[in-house]
Image (tube, helix red, strand yellow):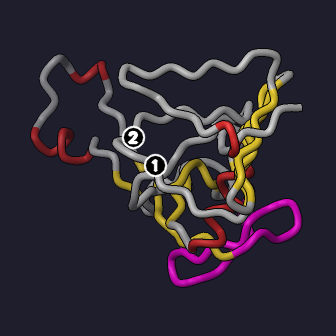
Amino acid sequence: MEAIQEHIDPAEGPEPTAEKKAASKLVYLQAPVQLGRLVAPEGEGWRVSYAGQERVLMADESVDPALLSEAAERGVRVVIECAEGDPLIVGLLQASRVLEVDREGQLIAELRSVSLTAKELLFRAPGAFVEVKDHSVEIYANKVLTRARTLAKTLAAMIKFN
């Protein structure tokens, strides 16, 4: 960290003078944290535009590499720690809500509604799946349950049994 600090000498007594109090303040020559814009991956690091220049910086191991890849596509702002040694990417600034996929690949979200448009949709679990494709729905499982509080009608002509 680029900082200058003068210490108060404890031998001078319990009450330092106003002049000594003013001299003991911490003065940064460079902010310990800066913001930059993620440009693209480069080698083992990431090209970042900040402080009027572009540099290749390494990311802290706590930052998910997949998150950085997605952020580079959107030009997201990154948080850069400049306190000690080489500047280091320590996080991102989000400007909108995103669905979070953790490092184990789990997606957990509470939403009001979900709208998905795709040519093919596949929900898969061990031993079962639901596939929606070309005006048809295929369900594969050992047991399929359908429950309704009101009358449910199924037209036998439209059902195909194996």
Taking the view exactly as shown, the residue that stands out farthest to the bottom is 52
Q: Nearer the viewer, residue 162 or 105?
A: 162
User: Badge 1 is on which residue?
Assistant: 114
Give x and y (percent) for residue 150: 36, 24
Q: Nearer the viewer, residue 134 or 52?
A: 134
Assign a secondary structure to mark 2. loop
- The quarter holding residue 144 reads top right
What is the distance, in whole Å, between disc 1 and disc 2 at their CAs? 7 Å
Q: Nearer the viewer, residue 63 or 26?
A: 63
Residue 28, placed above or below residue 38: above
Residue 110, placed above or below residue 94: above
- The quarter holding residue 127 reads top right
Q: Nearer the viewer, residue 71 or 31?
A: 71
State left or right for residue 63 relative to residue 16. right
Given the image, on which type of amino acid does mark 2 rest? Answer: Leu
Tell me if residue 55 is in the magenta stretch: yes
Please name the residue shown 77% across and 69% down the image: 41
Given the image, on which type of amino acid does mark 1 rest? Answer: Val
Give x and y (percent) for residue 145: 63, 18
The quarter in which the C terminus is drawn is top right
Q: Which residues are magenta?
A: 40-57
Few, some or many residues within 10 Å of mark 1 (<14, 14–19, 20+) = few
- The quarter holding residue 131 reads top right
State left or right for residue 129 relative to residue 147. right
Mark 1 and 2 residues: CB-CB less than 8 Å, in contact? yes
Q: Which mark is residue 111?
A: 2
Few, some or many residues within 10 Å of mark 2 (<14, 14–19, 20+) = few
